């Protein structure tokens, strides 16, 4: 081993505490980078594998009723490779052990053979049989949530007739990776399930024998999906087609893609923040440590080492530390990434798991870390190697001391001698002081950025379920009904108030942009279901014209005052030109609203209702449940308390997992920053502090000088770090902006307090370590001069 390499090992061992701290900071950044992005890549691979293996559809369409021969017309569309014509219906379920009425989406499957599109993964049990019309397959999430298994029975109201059905199989489907009730914002696995029934049995139940009301298609590679959608609409329009949609807008896939987009956003932004802080710390610590070796650099040059060789020697410092940190980070990132992928796989009920750590991600993480090492070393070595050896062998000229600003304004008499020393030292090296403050501030900022997400979700929960959706239950009718249905609803047990609504499937078109969605008609001045913007202000639905979510207006590229073509997909199917009256910056979904009277007037229909929002006496909720379970005209019941519970169980818990991992890494970075600041300060001032001990200051007094500086730097850095963390959180909110959720920017007091306390505790622990080192200071060794 060369002498210079032995020196490298000795030097690194001499600052092994700092090496470990920096390596952990780098490892935290690398681990966070690999954790999020490898989980995203793995989920994307799992999703694509699952979709391909079980033939997930590319185009989906609902309709009123069409004979089966229409499916042959669909098969003849250029680019269509497979067609599955089905019967689909939402009904109310009475599940044993479940007080609330559940909703089941019934989907027909062939009794013989497998579906050409949207095949099932049969987890247990067997396929439906033509001789047993009451045998059904249920999705695994619904079965697990309600404790259902093979052979169990439940009751359902099928087209007004009450039937007892027996579970013969439990399955998963790529069409229902995320099972969500139409119009809801979160999945409720306990109250909403998918039931697959034999084609003949379900067709007979809904008088659709030899007909279908739903279709899924796959498109050949290279074919135009928009072109296929246009042809599908032309074929199905005479049969009451509600408008074909691409896979991108299919509800389950839409929510899954939004979740993956959010994961990718966090995976892009948050690790960059971590690695940037790690790079800054590496630059500061290595730079200040190398500056302490000024005389050693001069000796190396005097012995014949060229400037390039000296720079390469110290570059190895940084690269060795980076290699240690990267090794820890890659191992931790791969382990945590596999665990996170497994959690998401269980959450979305993928039947397969495909975890991989892409090599390009590892290379990117190593490249960023190595770049930080190079930047941290070269900046300091450059100034040192420029000096001639004889000049570099001399100590740096002492800094000029003069009264501090505090003394010059007349406050010096209130300061003790050690306190004046602290003030003068902080002032005479403002750049170094500022860098220390900034380093500690960055440590606190990543804590804020890691913890704010649950604050935002708490506000989102409040906005959605306590300000906007204040109804206790939402009833949806099987078919649009007359006002008499509202009187029937008001007569149900426990119902104290009811607000009708009208939901109309439409296609909104503006220029070349379009979106298949629905318009919800609300009563003027609603009390139960209201439109609320991001700030919590209730927005009135205009007396005429559309009220669009700001995100939907952005998709359509439309502004208030402009006209939108509204192609209604039910009834007489009129095509209307409706102005956009206003937009609302809401937090959930891409919604379109109209005043209920205006919607009736535009559609030229009477007071037709799609359902009602209910206020219910809580003491009579069980009686309402029992009554609703037997009503044939009710297609589904959505309960607010169940939605709140599901929101907390799904979104808050999944974000809590990510938050805890982020806090762990952020705490490592914060502690590493504070520790290294204290350690470097001690290394730089050992001779000065030893001199103070020799001239009579006690251990406590010299500790007060050094630790007092660290305390001031930390106290200044904490509020700065909280402010930087707020800015980071604001940037992450802008990035995490999907069509499903828009996170509000909320940084709660608890988050700020926890971040500040973490930094202060790290500073206190580092101070205890510094005090211990000061107590062991070897005065003779420190004060020896090298001639």
Image (cartoon, rainbow, N blue to C red):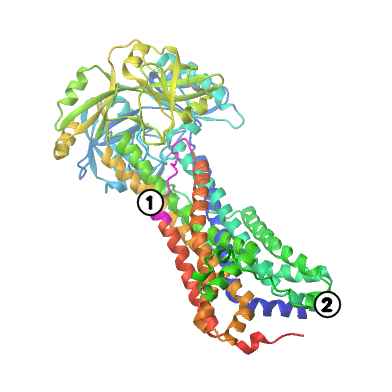
The segment highlighted magenta reads: 738-752
Q: Is residue 23 left or right of residue 455?
A: right
Q: Is residue 641 visible?
A: yes
Q: Position of residue 258 (x, y in %)?
A: 48, 40
- Residue situated in front as seen by the camera: 69 or 433: 433
Q: Earlier in the sequence, mark 1 or mark 2?
A: 2
Does residue 471 belong to the magenta stretch?
no
Q: Residues within 10 Å of mark 2 (few under 14, many from 20)?
A: few
Does residue 748 belong to the magenta stretch?
yes
Q: Could you tell me which secondary element the residue under label 2 belongs to? A: helix
Residue at 58% across, 58% down: 277
Q: Is residue 349 visible?
A: no
Compared with 573, 404 (above or below) is below
Q: Position of residue 546 (x, y in %)?
A: 41, 20
Residue 653: give its label.
1
- Residue situated in front as seen by the camera: 545 or 556: 545
Residue 390: give its label.
2
Q: Position of residue 668 (x, y in %)?
A: 51, 64
Q: Position of residue 291 (x, y in %)?
A: 70, 71
Q: Is residue 166 left or right of residue 769?
A: left
């Amino acid at each position: 081993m060369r002498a210079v390499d032995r020196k490298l090992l000795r030097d690194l061992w001499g600052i092994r505490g700092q090496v470990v701290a920096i390596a952990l900071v780098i490892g935290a950044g690398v681990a966070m980078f690999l954790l999020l992005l490898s989980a995203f890549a793995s989920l994307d691979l799992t999703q694509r594998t699952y979709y391909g293996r079980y033939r997930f559809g590319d185009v989906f369409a609902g309709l009123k009723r069409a004979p089966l021969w229409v499916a042959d017309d669909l098969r003849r569309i250029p680019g269509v490779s497979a067609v599955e014509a089905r019967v689909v219906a939402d009904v109310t379920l009475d599940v044993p052990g479940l007080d609330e009425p559940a909703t089941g989406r019934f989907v027909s499957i062939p009794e013989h053979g497998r579906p050409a599109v949207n095949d099932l993964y049969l987890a247990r049990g067997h396929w439906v049989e033509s001789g047993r019309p009451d045998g059904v397959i249920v999705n695994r999430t619904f079965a697990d949530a309600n404790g259902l298994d093979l052979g169990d029975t439940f009751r359902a109201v099928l087209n007004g007739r009450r039937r007892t059905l027996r579970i013969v199989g439990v399955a998963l489907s790529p069409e229902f990776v995320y099972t969500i009730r139409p119009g809801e914002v979160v999945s409720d696995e306990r109250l909403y399930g998918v039931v697959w029934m034999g084609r003949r049995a379900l067709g007979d139940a809904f008088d659709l024998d030899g007909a279908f009301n739903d279709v899924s298609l796959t498109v050949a590679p290279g074919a135009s999906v928009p072109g296929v959608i246009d042809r599908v609409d032309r074929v199905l329009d005479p049969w009451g087609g509600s408008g074909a949609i691409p896979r991108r807008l299919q509800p389950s896939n839409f929510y899954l893609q939004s979740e993956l987009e959010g994961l990718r956003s966090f995976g892009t932004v948050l690790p960059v923040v971590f690695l940037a802080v790690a790079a800054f710390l590496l630059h500061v610590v290595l730079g200040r440590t190398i500056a302490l070796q000024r005389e050693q650099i001069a000796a190396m040059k005097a012995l014949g080492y060229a400037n390039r060789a000296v720079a390469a020697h110290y570059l190895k410092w940084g690269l060795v530390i980076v290699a240690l940190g990267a090794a820890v980070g890659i191992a931790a990132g791969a382990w945590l990434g596999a665990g996170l992928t497994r959690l998401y796989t269980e959450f979305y009920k993928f039947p397969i798991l495909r975890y991989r750590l892409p090599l390009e991600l590892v290379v990117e993480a190593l490249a960023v870390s190595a770049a930080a090492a190079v930047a941290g070393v070269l900046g300091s070595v450059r100034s040192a190697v420029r000096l001639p050896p004889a000049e570099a062998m001399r100590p740096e000229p002492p800094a000029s001391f003069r009264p501090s600003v505090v003394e010059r304004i007349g406050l010096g008499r209130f300061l003790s001698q050690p306190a004046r020393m602290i003030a003068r030292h902080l002032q005479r090296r403002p750049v170094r002081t500022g860098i220390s403050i900034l380093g500690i501030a960055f440590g606190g900022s990543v804590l804020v950025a890691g913890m704010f997400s649950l604050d935002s979700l708490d506000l989102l929960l409040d906005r959605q379920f306590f300000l906007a959706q204040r109804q206790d239950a939402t009833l949806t009718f099987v078919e649009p009904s007359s006002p008499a249905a509202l009187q029937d609803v008001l007569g149900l047990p426990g119902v104290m108030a009811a607000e009708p609504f009208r939901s109309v499937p439409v296609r909104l078109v503006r220029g070349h942009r379009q979106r298949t969605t629905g318009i919800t008609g609300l009563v003027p001045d609603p009390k139960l279901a209201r439109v609320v913007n991001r700030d919590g202000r209730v927005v009135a639905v205009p007396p005429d014209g559309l009220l669009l979510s700001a995100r939907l207006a952005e998709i359509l590229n439309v502004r208030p005052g402009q006209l939108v073509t509204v192609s209604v997909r039910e009834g007489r199917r009129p095509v209307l030109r409706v102005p956009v009256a206003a937009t609302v910056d809401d937090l959930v979904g891409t919604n379109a609203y109209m005043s209920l009277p205006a919607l009736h007037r535009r559609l030229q229909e009477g007071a037709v209702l799609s359902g009602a929002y209910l206020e219910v006496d809580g003491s009579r909720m069980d009686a309402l449940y029992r009554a609703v379970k037997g009503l044939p005209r009710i297609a589904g019941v959505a309960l607010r308390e169940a939605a709140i519970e599901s929101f907390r169980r799904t979104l808050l818990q999944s974000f809590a997992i990510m938050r805890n991992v982020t806090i762990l890494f952020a705490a490592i970075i914060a502690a590493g920053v504070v520790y290294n600041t204290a350690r470097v300060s001690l290394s730089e001032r050992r001779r000065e502090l030893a001199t103070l001990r020799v001239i009579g200051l006690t251990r406590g007094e010299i500790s007060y000088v050094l630790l007092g500086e660290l305390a001031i730097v930390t106290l200044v850095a904490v509020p700065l770090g909280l402010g930087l963390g707020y800015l980071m959180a604001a940037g992450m909110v802008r990035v995490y902006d999907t069509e499903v959720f828009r996170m509000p920017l909320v940084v709660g007091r608890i988050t700020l307090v926890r971040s500040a306390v973490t930094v202060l505790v790290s500073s206190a622990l580092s101070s205890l370590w510094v005090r211990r080192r000061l107590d062991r200071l070897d005065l003779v060794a420190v004060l020896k001069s090298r001639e």
